[in-house]
Amino acid sequence: MADRFHTTSAQSQTRWGRGLPAMGSQGDITETLAGLAKRYGLRGYLLINVPSETSTDFSSNVLLTSWPDEMLKTYDHAGLIFGSPVVERLRQSTNPFAYDADGTNRRRLDGKAAIATSLFEKHGMTRGAYFPAHNSAGLRGALAFGGTREALNPREMAELNAVANHIFAEMVEIRAGAGQHAPLSRREIECLSWASAGKTSVEMSEILGLSEYTVNHYLNRATRKLDAVNRVQAVAKAIRAGLLN
């Protein structure tokens, strides 16, 4: 793996500019991302679909990541997707940008700056960068890397930006081409079933004995697994697939 990424600056810029070789599996992409993180002295990577305005959690938008499970769970439990300067910027811009956990979270308007900063410091992701990406169908995503090293320099930013679209498109194609999505859990099917009956998240939470947040979490995960854009389309796809009566 080390040899795969050991190049001079000029060679690297040319190679990344042409894009990476085709990757045939999710394992290949995971290996590539881990290699890139190591090559640039970064701790973790994150490959996501850009969360929609209606997303109520971050986890359901994650395609691949080396973030610890505890970090993702804490992020969602604290509702940090709401008011996130990073998520908002990804929705509005296609330009790559660096982040600093302390400085970036100071722009939060929800009073959760200290919680967010502490979370990223705890897991060694205090500095890094996001590289917006898209595929030929217009699906928007982002590739991100984080760690504790000094900020990426312009050359490094350009190199990583050059591979973001390729890796994101490969991941989307692999998932779609396999024709296999993660199976829906019992709770996800239950929530979709009640959604098909016209129940709101609040009504479902009362029926199922769950919090509204948990209901929305299940619906968002089901929507993502079915490659739907919203819960209405998710219900339609689930019915066509015979998952709902």
Image (tube, rainbow, N blue to C red):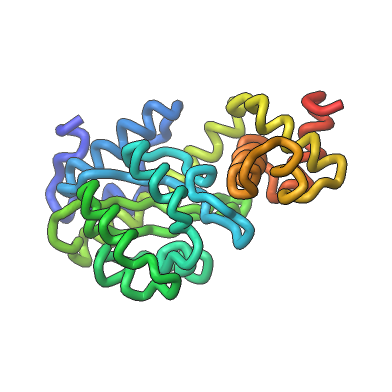
The answer to whether residue 245 shows anywhere in this view is: yes
Q: Which of 67 and 119 is in front in this view?
A: 119
Residue 168 percent across, percent down from the top left:
46, 45
- The residue sitting at 34% across, 44% down in the picture is 71
The answer to whether residue 179 shows anywhere in this view is: no
Residue 53 percent across, percent down from the top left:
61, 62
Position of the C terminus, as image quadrant, is top right
- The residue sitting at 36% across, 59% down in the picture is 130
Residue 29 percent across, percent down from the top left:
38, 34
Compared across the picture, whether 229 is left or right of 65 comes to: right
Compared across the picture, whether 124 is left or right of 187 comes to: left
Image: 108 above or below 192: below
Compared across the picture, whether 138 is left or right of 205 comes to: left
Image: 1 above or below 150: above
- The residue sitting at 42% across, 42% down in the picture is 73
**How many numbered dots are placed on residues in this image?**
0
Q: Nearer the viewer, residue 82 or 170?
A: 82
Position of the N terminus, as image quadrant, is top left
- The residue sitting at 60% across, 30% down in the picture is 177
Q: Nearer the viewer, residue 197 or 39?
A: 197
Residue 30 percent across, percent down from the top left:
35, 33
